[in-house]
Image (cartoon, rainbow, N blue to C red):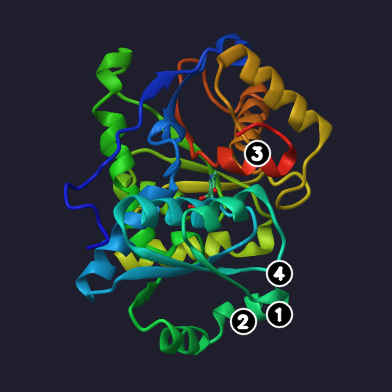
Amino acid sequence: MLFPPNDWLPKAPLELLHLDWLSHAGIDVAILRLDQIDPLISGNKWFKLIEHLKAADQTGAEGIISLGGAHSNHLHALAAAGKRFGFSTVGLLRGHPQETPTIKDLQAFGMQLHWLGYGGYRARHEAGFWESWQTRYPTLYPVPEGGGGLPGARGCMQLKSQVCAQLAALGWSDYDGWWLACGTGTTLAGLVLAEAGEHPVYGALAVPDDHGVAQQVERIVAEAGVRGAAYELLDTSRGGFAKIDPQLLEFIEQTEKLSGIALEPLYTGKALLALKQQVEAGRFARGTRLVFVHTGGLQGRRGFNLQA
Ligand SMILES: Cc1ncc(COP(=O)(O)O)c(C=O)c1O
């Protein structure tokens, strides 16, 4: 049994975000704190894993094999879930052996690691990639990079109900849209499926345009058969994935001081800075209410010498 028998379903708090640039523009933002659901299985990762774990259970698998980089939030949450709920995990890693705080955690959580090099990791999209790994680990269920695909998106659909259940407590009768960081676009696709056009979803891209996020989102939405999808992807990677600049770091530091909410520079920091720029450019009318999703990833801060 991989999925927790008691349907362990963490609840993410929804809180108002108080920042000068929002109040000047008359924009209300509530932040969905997926970073708060659990100290280890944090962020959007658990939601992206839910349906994969259920599918693995249906096949009688005893564990999960998946892929990621040396700072991967996905492998971190997966390894922590394996340790917590008692299933085995194998991680296939991009590049050559190195010791990062994330890798040390993966080992401590009992995940078995294999380094694929860069060429070997690129082969993950080729037909037949999984065959040799399934021969080697016949009892493990393969989960794509980042917990993506339609199952990953379906698990994220419940974020809408978590938000709706907490609106009244904020004094909100409704909201006008979502704003969140995108890596593969799976979490955004889940919200797009849940909304089915009711509210728009704005995705701040943590990766450059040519990473195929738009195609991936389209594929998921088409596979789910949803019509009238309302979303927009914004080019907000600031020069590329994991590219950090002084303006971004200063914004993160200031925001943390003012709000008490920790951000990380790859996803949530860039997404919130992009929102600030759009708000200041007058994109949203006064009185607009947005839900910003804090997708977690704080363990990855250690790779930038920031505290987790
Ligand atoms: C902290 C964090 N936020 C956002 C994302 C993006 O999620 P998605 O791949 O579902 O777009 C990721 C992973 O890619 C992440 O680790």
Mark nearer the N terminus (3 vs 4): 4
Q: Residue at x 27, y 30 (%)?
A: 164
Badge nearest the viewer, 3 or 2: 3
Which of the 4 quarters of the picture holds residue 151?
A: bottom left
Mark nearer the N terminus (3 vs 1): 1
Amino acid carrying label 4: it is: Gly
Q: Marks 2 and 3: in contact by CB < 8 Å?
A: no
User: Height in image: 58 above or below 133?
Assistant: above
Describe the element under mark 4 as helix, strand or loop: loop
Q: Residue at x 38, y 59 (%)?
A: 152
Which of the 4 quarters of the picture holds residue 262?
A: top right
Give percent across and percent down for residue 267: 61, 42
Residue extending farthest to the left is 6
Name the disc covering residue 175, or none: none
Look at mark 3 in the image and give the residue it sits on. 301
Describe the element under mark 2 as helix, strand or loop: helix
Q: Residue at x 59, y 65 (%)?
A: 212
